[in-house]
Amino acid sequence: MLLTLSEGLAQKMVKVVTKTISQRLETPLDSGILVQGKKAEVQVMGWAESFIKVEMDLVAKHSKLEIAREELEYIQYKISKKDERYIIENSFFSNRTRSRIKSSLSVVYRIFVPINTKVVINNQYGTVSAANLFNSILFDVKFCDVNFERLFGEIIAKGEYSEFRGKNFDALLSVNVKRSDIEFKEFAGQADIKNNYGDIQLHPSPMLKSLGVESRHGKVDVFVNSLNAFNYDVRVNSSYINLPNTESNFVKSNESKSEFHFQKRNGLNKANINITNLLYPVSIMAFNQSNN
């Protein structure tokens, strides 16, 4: 294990004290890793090595350097094994005083794992990023920004009061979130997305196999190269469906709901896009609006 300590100025009148811990985990376990972060920036990246490398920056910020130095010790961390899984976690605690912590304390994780490692990330009040993984990953977050790319296998996302952004992935995707915004670009595979109070923006690739969306209290925007690239079953209650002008006559509406059902009868096996929404509109925007 390697530890280093540094001090500096992040901005005018704010002193920063950082302790860096580096640890190598020689043998990846069958159940992978579990990261339990609090006020953390969690970065997990797949790499070509056969071992796991964990780097942690413990950070304290305060206008007085001596307070930042003292309260840096309030950041606790632990790396352990349980049920064939490595657990990497942090907390904020001091035995010496019960007084209110004066510094801004946080943790930055940089974790490098073999690309076939199973990953679970729990985090609150921070950020999460993941890339280059080929097994399964679970995000379970609150008050976080989540970004991921080049994930293949299974992706499960749970969260509240967060933002989820993903691109260039091909996976079995399951999203069940509340009060969160979602933006996915150039994704393939099978996707099932549920969101309550939050906007959804989707850019599926032509390799998509299926897409299901259930939304309440948030707009849904879907961007496709051509409307004819997919089959659609869209239902909206107490709002409307927006389509390219040339296709707007396919929408059936009454006072309480709108529906759009579209299936090209040309023998091609096209992916189905199923969307239901309550109170907010669904828009399907095609770059090739002529749909020739």
Image (cartoon, helix red, strand yellow):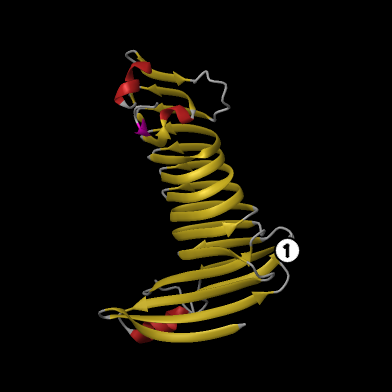
User: Can you give x and y, in whole percent of width and height, for residue 183 in the image?
Assistant: 42, 45
Please tell me which residue is depicted at 53% across the width and 59% down the height of the picture. Answer: 130
Question: Does residue 157 lie above or below 90 as drawn?
Answer: above
Q: Residues within 10 Å of mark 1 (few under 14, many from 20)?
A: some
Name the quarter where the N terminus is drawn: bottom right
Quarter-wise, where is residue 178 in the image? top left
Q: Which residues are magenta?
A: 284-288
Residue 286 visible from this viewpoint? no
Say which amino acid is labelled 1. Leu
Question: Does residue 53 lie above or below 141 as drawn?
Answer: below
Magenta segment's dominant SS is strand
Question: Does residue 234 lie above or below 114 as drawn?
Answer: above
Question: Does residue 223 lie above or below 116 as drawn?
Answer: above
Please tell me which residue is depicted at 36% across the width and 74% down the height of the picture. Answer: 102
Query: Which one is in front, 142 or 276?
Result: 276
Q: How many marks?
A: 1
User: Can you give x and y, in whole percent of width and height, for residue 259 in the image?
Assistant: 41, 19
Give the secondary structure at mark 1. Answer: loop
Q: Does residue 287 belong to the magenta stretch? A: yes
User: Can you give x and y, in whole percent of width and height, for residue 79 in the image?
Assistant: 63, 71
User: Which residue corresponds to mark 1?
Assistant: 29
**Residue at the far left in the pictured view:** 12
**Residue at the far top in the pictured view:** 254
Name the quarter where the C terminus is drawn: top left
Residue 163 visible from this viewpoint? yes
Q: Does residue 173 belong to the magenta stretch? A: no
Please tell me which residue is depicted at 74% across the width and 61% down the height of the picture. Answer: 84
